[in-house]
């Protein structure tokens, strides 16, 4: 059994038994999330479409993330369950500042200043949900070499990143929201109206043989999405797009078995213009045409 320790104290010694998060078979949620950026991340000019992203290294800073732990205490009745829960509450009441939350998934320095909720499951079990906040998140750097893949991010295929793209939704086929401008007269609002930035939601599936490989995949996305500058996205049946990530991402539906670990990454990307699209020239036999240096010949469409 996975042992959960709070401030180096085994919660199991106080009667706590780890449970499972929704659509998951582990007790922890949020521990793999990428936090959102803090500070100003872009500027929206009223007379221009889209936004001006702030993506230099000096402009990129991150906040914290929320982590939750679910489990149970069992007793001879509701009063016995309540007494066992109070023992855990008394432990928490003695904490000040950050304390360590540790388990097989990692060690996190957290505030225990969030709520702990309880719900009885019958008369002899109390389901408890602990809500923590990790103010400083360490994101491991793990770069993935570009392979000039046809589809992927920055020339890296989703497969090389360690995930499968399930779908992209949002404003792909829609005109972004018009900008709201202040007008001094009704006639002022009859001219051309610029639009806000387009936002697209990516949903990706991680399927790895073990915990270490799963962790490496998450780290690759940390590294890719936190790098200065804009990312380039190419997916089938869509325009080429450049984007940045300001809201981090969520990792849910985490399931771990002895020889497999899976999860879902959901990420909202903010577009900063549509890239020019090129296609490779082909001959009548659908073979790609190259020049004298054996380089592919492409044309803009």
Image (spheres, grey):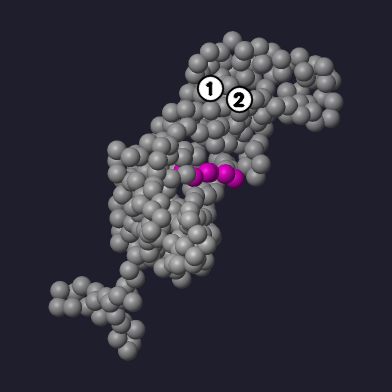
Q: What element carries label 2?
A: loop
Q: How far apart are marks 2 and 1 (CA)?
A: 8 Å
Answer left or right for 141 relative to 115.
left
Answer left or right for 221 relative to 111.
left
Q: What element carries label 1?
A: loop
Q: In this rendering, is residue 7 above or below 40?
A: above
Quarter residue 258 falls in? top right
User: Can you give x and y, in whole percent of width and height, for residue 186 in the image?
Assistant: 52, 62
Q: Which residue is drawn at 62% across and 19% down?
A: 11
Please give the residue where the numbered disc 2 appears in the rendered image. 114
Quarter placement of the C terminus: bottom left
Q: Are marks 2 and 1 in contact (CB under 8 Å)?
A: yes
User: Can you give x and y, in whole percent of width and height, for residue 70 in the image?
Assistant: 65, 31
Residue interval drawn in magenta: 248-253
Answer left or right for 117 relative to 280.
right
Please give the residue where the numbered disc 1 appears in the rendered image. 111
Q: Is residue 249 magenta?
A: yes
Q: In this rendering, is residue 175 above or below 146?
A: below
Residue 211 visible somewhere in the drawing: no
């Amino acid at each position: 059994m996975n042992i959960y320790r709070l401030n180096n104290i085994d919660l199991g010694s106080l009667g706590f038994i780890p449970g499972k998060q929704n659509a998951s078979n582990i007790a922890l949620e949020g521990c793999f999330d990428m936090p959102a950026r803090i500070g100003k991340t872009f500027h929206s000019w009223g007379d221009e479409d889209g936004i001006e992203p702030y993506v230099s290294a000096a402009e990129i800073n991150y906040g914290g993330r929320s982590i939750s732990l679910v489990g149970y205490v069992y007793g001879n009745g509701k009063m016995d369950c309540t007494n066992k829960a109070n023992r855990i509450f008394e432990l928490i009441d003695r904490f000040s500042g950050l304390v360590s939350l540790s388990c097989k998934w990692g060690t996190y320095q957290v505030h225990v200043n969030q709520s702990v909720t309880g719900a009885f499951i019958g008369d002899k079990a109390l389901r408890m949900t602990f809500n923590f906040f990790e103010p400083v998140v360490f994101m491991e750097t793990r770069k993935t070499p570009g392979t000039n893949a046809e589809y992927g991010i920055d020339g890296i295929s989703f497969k090389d990143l360690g995930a499968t793209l399930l779908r992209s939704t949002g404003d792909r086929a829609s005109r972004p929201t018009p900008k709201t401008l202040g007008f001094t007269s009704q006639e002022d609002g009859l001219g051309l109206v610029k639009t806000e930035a387009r936002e697209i939601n990516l949903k990706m599936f991680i399927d790895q043989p073990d915990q270490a490989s799963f962790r490496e995949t998450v780290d690759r996305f940390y590294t890719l999405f936190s790098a200065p500058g804009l990312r380039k996205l190419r997916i089938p049946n869509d325009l080429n797009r450049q984007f940045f990530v300001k809201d981090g991402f969520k990792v849910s539906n985490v399931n771990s078995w002895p020889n497999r670990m899976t999860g879902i990454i959901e990420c909202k990307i903010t577009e900063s213009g549509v890239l020019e699209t090129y296609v490779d020239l082909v001959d009548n036999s659908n073979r790609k045409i190259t020049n004298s240096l054996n380089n592919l010949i492409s044309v803009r469409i």
